[in-house]
Image (cartoon, grey):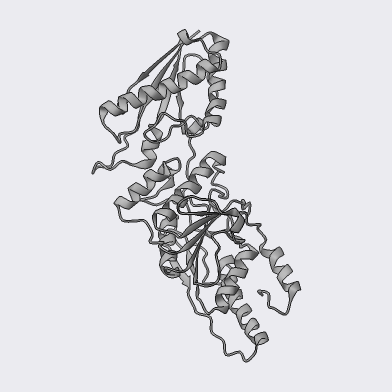
Amino acid sequence: MYPSARSSASLLSLAALLSLSLMACSESVAGTPDMANAAPLGCEMSGTGPIALAVGLHANAPIPVIDPALVDLMKESVKARHPISLIRIDGAPKGVFAERFTSDAGNDVALDDDIDSYLTEVEQRITGSKEESIRAKAPEVDVLGAFARAADSAGPRGNVVLIDPGLQTMAPLDFRDMINAEPAQVVTYLRGKSLIPDLKGRKVLLSGLGYPALPQLDPGSALRKNIVAIWKEIAQAGGAACVAVNVVPNDKKAPESAPAVSVVPLPPMRDTFAPCEKAELSDGNNVGFEQGKSRFRDLGAARKTLAKLADTIRKHDLDVKLIGSTSSEDTRAFNLRLSRERAEAVKRELIALGVSTGSITAEGHGERWEGRVHDLAPDGTLLPGLAARNRKVIAQLSCP
Protein backbone atom coordinates (compact mmCIF):
# COMPACT_ATOMS: atom_id res chain seq x y z
CA MET A 1 0.00 0.00 0.00
CA TYR A 2 1.30 3.52 -0.73
CA PRO A 3 1.86 5.78 2.29
CA SER A 4 -0.89 8.02 3.60
CA ALA A 5 -0.48 11.25 5.51
CA ARG A 6 -1.39 9.33 8.64
CA SER A 7 1.51 6.91 8.55
CA SER A 8 5.19 7.93 8.46
CA ALA A 9 6.07 4.29 9.22
CA SER A 10 4.30 3.31 6.02
CA LEU A 11 6.39 5.83 4.10
CA LEU A 12 9.62 4.33 5.46
CA SER A 13 8.42 0.86 4.51
CA LEU A 14 7.69 1.99 0.96
CA ALA A 15 11.08 3.67 0.65
CA ALA A 16 12.76 0.42 1.68
CA LEU A 17 10.70 -1.53 -0.83
CA LEU A 18 11.26 0.79 -3.76
CA SER A 19 14.58 2.39 -2.82
CA LEU A 20 16.87 3.55 -5.58
CA SER A 21 18.68 6.78 -4.76
CA LEU A 22 18.12 9.15 -7.63
CA MET A 23 21.10 11.34 -8.45
CA ALA A 24 19.42 13.19 -11.26
CA CYS A 25 21.37 15.79 -13.15
CA SER A 26 19.08 18.50 -14.44
CA GLU A 27 19.93 20.19 -17.70
CA SER A 28 18.09 22.58 -19.93
CA VAL A 29 17.76 21.99 -23.64
CA ALA A 30 20.46 24.58 -24.12
CA GLY A 31 22.73 22.36 -22.06
CA THR A 32 23.23 24.62 -19.04
CA PRO A 33 23.46 22.66 -15.75
CA ASP A 34 21.33 23.96 -12.88
CA MET A 35 22.24 21.67 -10.02
CA ALA A 36 21.70 24.29 -7.31
CA ASN A 37 18.03 24.76 -8.16
CA ALA A 38 17.26 21.20 -9.29
CA ALA A 39 14.31 19.49 -7.67
CA PRO A 40 14.94 15.98 -6.28
CA LEU A 41 13.99 14.43 -9.62
CA GLY A 42 15.77 17.03 -11.72
CA CYS A 43 14.10 19.37 -14.19
CA GLU A 44 12.12 20.87 -11.31
CA MET A 45 9.47 18.24 -11.94
CA SER A 46 6.27 18.87 -10.05
CA GLY A 47 2.82 17.43 -9.74
CA THR A 48 1.28 20.37 -11.57
CA GLY A 49 0.78 18.25 -14.68
CA PRO A 50 0.03 14.70 -15.83
CA ILE A 51 2.66 11.96 -15.55
CA ALA A 52 3.26 9.29 -18.18
CA LEU A 53 5.66 6.46 -17.42
CA ALA A 54 7.07 4.23 -20.18
CA VAL A 55 8.46 1.25 -18.29
CA GLY A 56 10.33 -1.85 -19.44
CA LEU A 57 9.56 -5.12 -17.67
CA HIS A 58 11.00 -7.41 -20.32
CA ALA A 59 13.78 -9.88 -21.04
CA ASN A 60 17.37 -8.56 -20.87
CA ALA A 61 16.25 -5.71 -18.58
CA PRO A 62 16.28 -5.56 -14.77
CA ILE A 63 12.98 -5.48 -12.94
CA PRO A 64 12.18 -1.74 -12.71
CA VAL A 65 12.40 0.15 -9.45
CA ILE A 66 10.82 3.46 -8.54
CA ASP A 67 12.51 6.11 -6.47
CA PRO A 68 10.56 7.38 -3.45
CA ALA A 69 10.86 10.88 -4.89
CA LEU A 70 8.95 9.69 -7.95
CA VAL A 71 6.28 8.25 -5.66
CA ASP A 72 5.98 11.67 -4.04
CA LEU A 73 5.68 13.29 -7.45
CA MET A 74 2.87 10.92 -8.43
CA LYS A 75 1.04 11.57 -5.19
CA GLU A 76 1.32 15.32 -5.70
CA SER A 77 0.00 14.97 -9.24
CA VAL A 78 -2.93 12.81 -8.16
CA LYS A 79 -3.90 15.30 -5.45
CA ALA A 80 -4.05 17.96 -8.15
CA ARG A 81 -6.38 15.63 -10.11
CA HIS A 82 -3.88 15.03 -12.93
CA PRO A 83 -3.87 11.57 -14.54
CA ILE A 84 -1.06 9.02 -14.38
CA SER A 85 -0.61 6.74 -17.37
CA LEU A 86 1.57 3.67 -17.89
CA ILE A 87 2.99 2.50 -21.21
CA ARG A 88 4.39 -0.99 -21.63
CA ILE A 89 7.78 -1.23 -23.37
CA ASP A 90 8.09 -4.33 -25.54
CA GLY A 91 7.91 -5.13 -29.25
CA ALA A 92 4.39 -3.65 -29.45
CA PRO A 93 4.19 -0.80 -26.91
CA LYS A 94 0.78 -0.25 -25.41
CA GLY A 95 -0.86 1.88 -22.76
CA VAL A 96 -1.92 -0.36 -19.87
CA PHE A 97 -3.27 2.20 -17.44
CA ALA A 98 -4.76 5.66 -17.90
CA GLU A 99 -7.53 5.91 -15.33
CA ARG A 100 -8.15 9.28 -13.73
CA PHE A 101 -8.25 9.46 -9.97
CA THR A 102 -11.72 10.00 -8.52
CA SER A 103 -12.85 10.32 -4.93
CA ASP A 104 -16.01 11.21 -3.04
CA ALA A 105 -14.11 11.50 0.25
CA GLY A 106 -15.59 13.90 2.74
CA ASN A 107 -12.39 14.70 4.62
CA ASP A 108 -8.62 14.80 4.15
CA VAL A 109 -7.98 11.48 5.85
CA ALA A 110 -10.40 9.64 3.60
CA LEU A 111 -8.96 11.47 0.56
CA ASP A 112 -5.45 10.28 1.45
CA ASP A 113 -6.73 6.73 1.72
CA ASP A 114 -8.32 6.95 -1.73
CA ILE A 115 -5.09 8.34 -3.19
CA ASP A 116 -3.13 5.50 -1.58
CA SER A 117 -5.46 2.96 -3.18
CA TYR A 118 -5.05 4.57 -6.58
CA LEU A 119 -1.25 4.61 -6.32
CA THR A 120 -1.22 1.02 -5.12
CA GLU A 121 -2.97 0.12 -8.35
CA VAL A 122 -0.23 1.96 -10.30
CA GLU A 123 2.54 0.26 -8.32
CA GLN A 124 1.08 -3.22 -8.86
CA ARG A 125 1.00 -2.67 -12.61
CA ILE A 126 4.61 -1.47 -12.65
CA THR A 127 5.96 -4.37 -10.60
CA GLY A 128 3.97 -6.92 -12.58
CA SER A 129 1.95 -8.19 -9.63
CA LYS A 130 -1.32 -7.34 -11.39
CA GLU A 131 -2.47 -9.26 -14.46
CA GLU A 132 -2.84 -6.20 -16.69
CA SER A 133 0.60 -4.75 -16.00
CA ILE A 134 3.54 -3.34 -17.91
CA ARG A 135 5.03 -6.87 -18.18
CA ALA A 136 6.12 -7.49 -21.79
CA LYS A 137 3.66 -9.28 -24.08
CA ALA A 138 5.44 -9.11 -27.45
CA PRO A 139 9.00 -10.14 -28.35
CA GLU A 140 11.78 -7.56 -28.84
CA VAL A 141 11.83 -3.96 -27.59
CA ASP A 142 10.56 -0.73 -29.16
CA VAL A 143 11.63 1.95 -26.70
CA LEU A 144 11.15 4.77 -29.19
CA GLY A 145 7.54 3.79 -29.81
CA ALA A 146 6.82 3.66 -26.08
CA PHE A 147 8.57 7.01 -25.56
CA ALA A 148 6.34 8.60 -28.20
CA ARG A 149 3.21 7.11 -26.62
CA ALA A 150 4.24 8.45 -23.22
CA ALA A 151 4.78 11.91 -24.72
CA ASP A 152 1.29 11.84 -26.20
CA SER A 153 -0.23 10.69 -22.91
CA ALA A 154 1.53 13.33 -20.81
CA GLY A 155 0.53 16.25 -23.00
CA PRO A 156 2.39 19.56 -23.49
CA ARG A 157 2.61 20.40 -19.78
CA GLY A 158 3.21 16.91 -18.47
CA ASN A 159 6.09 14.85 -17.12
CA VAL A 160 7.45 11.94 -19.17
CA VAL A 161 9.39 9.21 -17.36
CA LEU A 162 11.32 6.55 -19.29
CA ILE A 163 12.53 3.58 -17.21
CA ASP A 164 14.45 1.08 -19.36
CA PRO A 165 18.02 0.11 -20.38
CA GLY A 166 17.27 1.79 -23.73
CA LEU A 167 18.64 -1.00 -25.94
CA GLN A 168 15.96 -1.06 -28.62
CA THR A 169 16.04 -4.12 -30.91
CA MET A 170 13.67 -2.99 -33.66
CA ALA A 171 14.07 -0.78 -36.72
CA PRO A 172 14.57 2.07 -37.25
CA LEU A 173 16.54 2.41 -33.99
CA ASP A 174 17.98 -1.09 -33.64
CA PHE A 175 20.86 -0.85 -31.17
CA ARG A 176 22.39 -3.98 -32.66
CA ASP A 177 23.60 -1.48 -35.27
CA MET A 178 23.21 1.80 -33.39
CA ILE A 179 24.88 1.30 -30.01
CA ASN A 180 28.01 3.28 -30.94
CA ALA A 181 26.35 5.70 -33.38
CA GLU A 182 26.83 9.46 -33.02
CA PRO A 183 23.78 10.81 -31.09
CA ALA A 184 23.39 13.83 -33.39
CA GLN A 185 23.47 11.59 -36.44
CA VAL A 186 20.84 9.29 -34.93
CA VAL A 187 18.57 12.31 -34.51
CA THR A 188 19.17 13.40 -38.11
CA TYR A 189 18.31 9.88 -39.28
CA LEU A 190 15.10 9.70 -37.21
CA ARG A 191 14.07 13.22 -38.18
CA GLY A 192 14.36 12.24 -41.82
CA LYS A 193 11.79 9.54 -41.11
CA SER A 194 9.57 11.88 -39.01
CA LEU A 195 10.06 9.67 -35.96
CA ILE A 196 11.21 12.16 -33.32
CA PRO A 197 8.64 12.10 -30.46
CA ASP A 198 6.79 15.36 -29.85
CA LEU A 199 8.02 16.42 -26.41
CA LYS A 200 7.40 20.15 -26.64
CA GLY A 201 6.78 21.56 -23.18
CA ARG A 202 7.26 18.20 -21.43
CA LYS A 203 9.79 17.55 -18.68
CA VAL A 204 11.61 14.27 -19.19
CA LEU A 205 13.28 11.87 -16.76
CA LEU A 206 15.48 9.10 -18.23
CA SER A 207 16.20 6.28 -15.81
CA GLY A 208 18.12 3.00 -16.06
CA LEU A 209 19.67 3.68 -19.46
CA GLY A 210 22.64 1.43 -20.21
CA TYR A 211 22.00 -0.93 -17.30
CA PRO A 212 20.62 -4.18 -18.77
CA ALA A 213 20.29 -7.62 -17.20
CA LEU A 214 21.70 -10.96 -18.32
CA PRO A 215 21.93 -12.43 -20.88
CA GLN A 216 22.53 -8.90 -22.23
CA LEU A 217 26.08 -7.99 -21.28
CA ASP A 218 26.89 -4.75 -19.48
CA PRO A 219 28.02 -2.28 -22.18
CA GLY A 220 30.62 -0.62 -19.98
CA SER A 221 31.04 3.04 -19.15
CA ALA A 222 31.94 4.36 -22.63
CA LEU A 223 29.02 2.72 -24.45
CA ARG A 224 26.67 3.46 -21.55
CA LYS A 225 27.55 7.12 -21.89
CA ASN A 226 26.70 6.93 -25.59
CA ILE A 227 23.37 5.18 -24.94
CA VAL A 228 22.39 7.96 -22.53
CA ALA A 229 23.56 10.61 -25.00
CA ILE A 230 21.44 9.10 -27.81
CA TRP A 231 18.22 9.16 -25.79
CA LYS A 232 18.97 12.58 -24.35
CA GLU A 233 19.58 13.93 -27.85
CA ILE A 234 16.28 12.43 -29.02
CA ALA A 235 14.40 14.04 -26.11
CA GLN A 236 15.97 17.42 -26.75
CA ALA A 237 15.31 17.17 -30.49
CA GLY A 238 11.66 16.54 -29.61
CA GLY A 239 11.52 19.90 -27.86
CA ALA A 240 11.60 18.73 -24.23
CA ALA A 241 11.53 21.64 -21.79
CA CYS A 242 14.28 19.90 -19.87
CA VAL A 243 15.84 16.46 -19.56
CA ALA A 244 17.04 14.82 -16.33
CA VAL A 245 19.04 11.60 -16.16
CA ASN A 246 19.04 9.06 -13.33
CA VAL A 247 22.68 7.94 -13.11
CA VAL A 248 22.20 5.23 -10.46
CA PRO A 249 22.51 1.62 -11.71
CA ASN A 250 19.83 -1.04 -11.37
CA ASP A 251 21.38 -4.45 -10.68
CA LYS A 252 18.18 -6.50 -10.39
CA LYS A 253 17.61 -9.61 -12.49
CA ALA A 254 15.37 -9.74 -15.55
CA PRO A 255 11.79 -10.99 -15.07
CA GLU A 256 11.22 -14.68 -15.66
CA SER A 257 9.23 -16.11 -18.58
CA ALA A 258 9.28 -12.91 -20.61
CA PRO A 259 9.08 -12.92 -24.44
CA ALA A 260 12.45 -13.14 -26.16
CA VAL A 261 14.55 -10.04 -26.78
CA SER A 262 17.60 -10.17 -29.05
CA VAL A 263 20.95 -9.62 -27.38
CA VAL A 264 22.69 -6.46 -28.59
CA PRO A 265 26.26 -7.43 -29.52
CA LEU A 266 28.94 -5.16 -28.12
CA PRO A 267 31.86 -3.95 -30.24
CA PRO A 268 34.98 -6.10 -29.68
CA MET A 269 36.91 -4.58 -26.81
CA ARG A 270 40.24 -6.00 -27.93
CA ASP A 271 43.18 -3.88 -26.80
CA THR A 272 46.08 -6.31 -27.24
CA PHE A 273 48.35 -6.32 -30.29
CA ALA A 274 50.79 -8.75 -31.91
CA PRO A 275 53.33 -8.65 -34.74
CA CYS A 276 52.18 -9.39 -38.30
CA GLU A 277 48.55 -8.49 -37.61
CA LYS A 278 46.08 -5.93 -38.93
CA ALA A 279 44.38 -4.29 -35.94
CA GLU A 280 41.40 -1.93 -36.01
CA LEU A 281 41.54 1.16 -33.84
CA SER A 282 37.90 2.09 -33.35
CA ASP A 283 35.12 2.54 -30.80
CA GLY A 284 35.57 -1.11 -29.85
CA ASN A 285 38.91 -0.33 -28.21
CA ASN A 286 38.18 3.32 -27.42
CA VAL A 287 40.06 4.82 -30.39
CA GLY A 288 36.96 5.95 -32.29
CA PHE A 289 36.57 9.40 -33.83
CA GLU A 290 33.90 12.06 -33.76
CA GLN A 291 31.72 12.47 -36.82
CA GLY A 292 33.45 14.55 -39.49
CA LYS A 293 36.52 15.15 -37.31
CA SER A 294 39.94 13.70 -36.55
CA ARG A 295 39.33 14.18 -32.83
CA PHE A 296 39.08 11.10 -30.63
CA ARG A 297 35.72 10.61 -28.96
CA ASP A 298 37.51 9.87 -25.67
CA LEU A 299 41.15 11.01 -25.72
CA GLY A 300 42.06 9.54 -22.34
CA ALA A 301 40.68 6.10 -23.20
CA ALA A 302 42.28 6.23 -26.66
CA ARG A 303 45.70 6.91 -25.14
CA LYS A 304 45.41 3.87 -22.89
CA THR A 305 44.83 1.62 -25.90
CA LEU A 306 47.50 3.30 -28.01
CA ALA A 307 50.00 2.89 -25.14
CA LYS A 308 49.59 -0.88 -25.50
CA LEU A 309 50.09 -0.62 -29.26
CA ALA A 310 53.21 1.48 -28.72
CA ASP A 311 54.60 -1.07 -26.25
CA THR A 312 54.15 -3.86 -28.82
CA ILE A 313 55.86 -1.85 -31.56
CA ARG A 314 58.85 -0.97 -29.36
CA LYS A 315 59.20 -4.42 -27.80
CA HIS A 316 59.40 -6.21 -31.16
CA ASP A 317 61.02 -3.35 -33.10
CA LEU A 318 58.15 -3.26 -35.60
CA ASP A 319 57.04 -0.91 -38.36
CA VAL A 320 53.39 0.11 -38.52
CA LYS A 321 51.28 1.44 -41.36
CA LEU A 322 48.26 3.49 -40.26
CA ILE A 323 45.31 3.60 -42.67
CA GLY A 324 42.57 6.15 -41.95
CA SER A 325 38.96 5.40 -42.86
CA THR A 326 35.72 7.43 -42.90
CA SER A 327 32.01 6.97 -43.33
CA SER A 328 30.29 7.86 -46.62
CA GLU A 329 28.73 11.11 -45.45
CA ASP A 330 30.81 13.64 -47.38
CA THR A 331 32.69 14.17 -50.66
CA ARG A 332 35.54 11.99 -51.83
CA ALA A 333 38.05 14.83 -51.40
CA PHE A 334 36.85 15.67 -47.87
CA ASN A 335 36.90 12.03 -46.79
CA LEU A 336 40.42 11.49 -48.14
CA ARG A 337 41.70 14.48 -46.20
CA LEU A 338 39.82 13.50 -43.05
CA SER A 339 41.05 9.90 -43.17
CA ARG A 340 44.67 11.10 -43.47
CA GLU A 341 44.14 13.43 -40.53
CA ARG A 342 42.81 10.52 -38.45
CA ALA A 343 45.84 8.41 -39.29
CA GLU A 344 48.10 11.35 -38.44
CA ALA A 345 46.29 11.81 -35.11
CA VAL A 346 47.15 8.22 -34.17
CA LYS A 347 50.71 8.72 -35.39
CA ARG A 348 51.19 11.75 -33.14
CA GLU A 349 50.01 9.83 -30.12
CA LEU A 350 52.32 6.89 -30.87
CA ILE A 351 55.31 9.23 -31.25
CA ALA A 352 54.42 10.87 -27.95
CA LEU A 353 54.41 7.37 -26.46
CA GLY A 354 57.96 6.72 -27.57
CA VAL A 355 57.57 5.10 -31.00
CA SER A 356 60.22 6.16 -33.54
CA THR A 357 58.90 8.51 -36.23
CA GLY A 358 60.67 6.50 -38.91
CA SER A 359 58.78 3.32 -38.05
CA ILE A 360 55.35 4.85 -38.73
CA THR A 361 53.68 5.62 -42.03
CA ALA A 362 50.23 7.21 -42.21
CA GLU A 363 47.82 7.38 -45.14
CA GLY A 364 44.11 7.89 -45.78
CA HIS A 365 41.72 5.86 -47.91
CA GLY A 366 38.62 7.93 -47.26
CA GLU A 367 35.40 5.94 -47.62
CA ARG A 368 36.99 3.34 -49.90
CA TRP A 369 39.06 1.18 -47.60
CA GLU A 370 38.50 -2.42 -48.67
CA GLY A 371 37.57 -3.70 -45.20
CA ARG A 372 34.88 -1.14 -44.40
CA VAL A 373 31.15 -1.88 -44.02
CA HIS A 374 28.53 -0.50 -46.40
CA ASP A 375 26.88 2.36 -44.51
CA LEU A 376 24.27 3.66 -46.97
CA ALA A 377 20.64 2.61 -47.22
CA PRO A 378 19.24 1.81 -50.68
CA ASP A 379 17.89 5.39 -50.89
CA GLY A 380 21.33 6.84 -50.10
CA THR A 381 20.56 7.69 -46.47
CA LEU A 382 23.54 7.34 -44.15
CA LEU A 383 23.03 4.57 -41.58
CA PRO A 384 24.37 6.01 -38.30
CA GLY A 385 25.48 2.81 -36.60
CA LEU A 386 27.29 1.40 -39.63
CA ALA A 387 28.80 4.80 -40.38
CA ALA A 388 30.31 4.88 -36.88
CA ARG A 389 32.10 1.58 -37.57
CA ASN A 390 33.93 3.17 -40.48
CA ARG A 391 35.35 6.07 -38.46
CA LYS A 392 38.58 4.36 -37.52
CA VAL A 393 42.24 3.74 -38.24
CA ILE A 394 43.69 0.36 -39.23
CA ALA A 395 47.15 -0.47 -37.90
CA GLN A 396 49.12 -2.92 -40.06
CA LEU A 397 52.00 -4.26 -37.96
CA SER A 398 55.08 -5.68 -39.66
CA CYS A 399 56.61 -9.02 -38.77
CA PRO A 400 59.78 -9.06 -36.62
Describe residue 370's horizontal placement relative to residue 162 as left or right: left
Corner quadrant of residue 93: bottom left
Q: Residue furthest bottom?
A: 106
Closest to the observer, 42 or 18: 42
| Rendering coords of residue 159 (x, y %) | 50, 66
Disc tally is 0
Q: Does 209 appear above or below 375? A: below
The residue depicted at 54 percent of the width and 48 percent of the height is 210
Q: Do we see residue 98 in this rendering?
A: yes
Q: Quadrant of residue 39?
A: bottom right
- Residue 69: give x, y in percent of width and height: 63, 64
Which percent across, then down, holds residue 88? 48, 64
> Residue 240, how many percent across, how many down?
44, 59
Q: Nearer the viewer, residue 86 or 52?
A: 52
Q: Nearer the viewer, residue 309 or 233?
A: 233
Can you name the residue that lies furthest to the right here? 9
- For the N terminus, the image quarter is bottom right
Residue 142 visible, this angle: no
- Left/right placement of residue 318 relative to residue 378 reads right
Q: Is residue 208 above or below residue 397?
A: below
Q: Give the residue drawn at x 50%, y 48%.
A: 228
Instruction: Determine the residue positioned at 24% across, 42% down.
Output: 378
In the image, residue 153 above or below residue 215: below
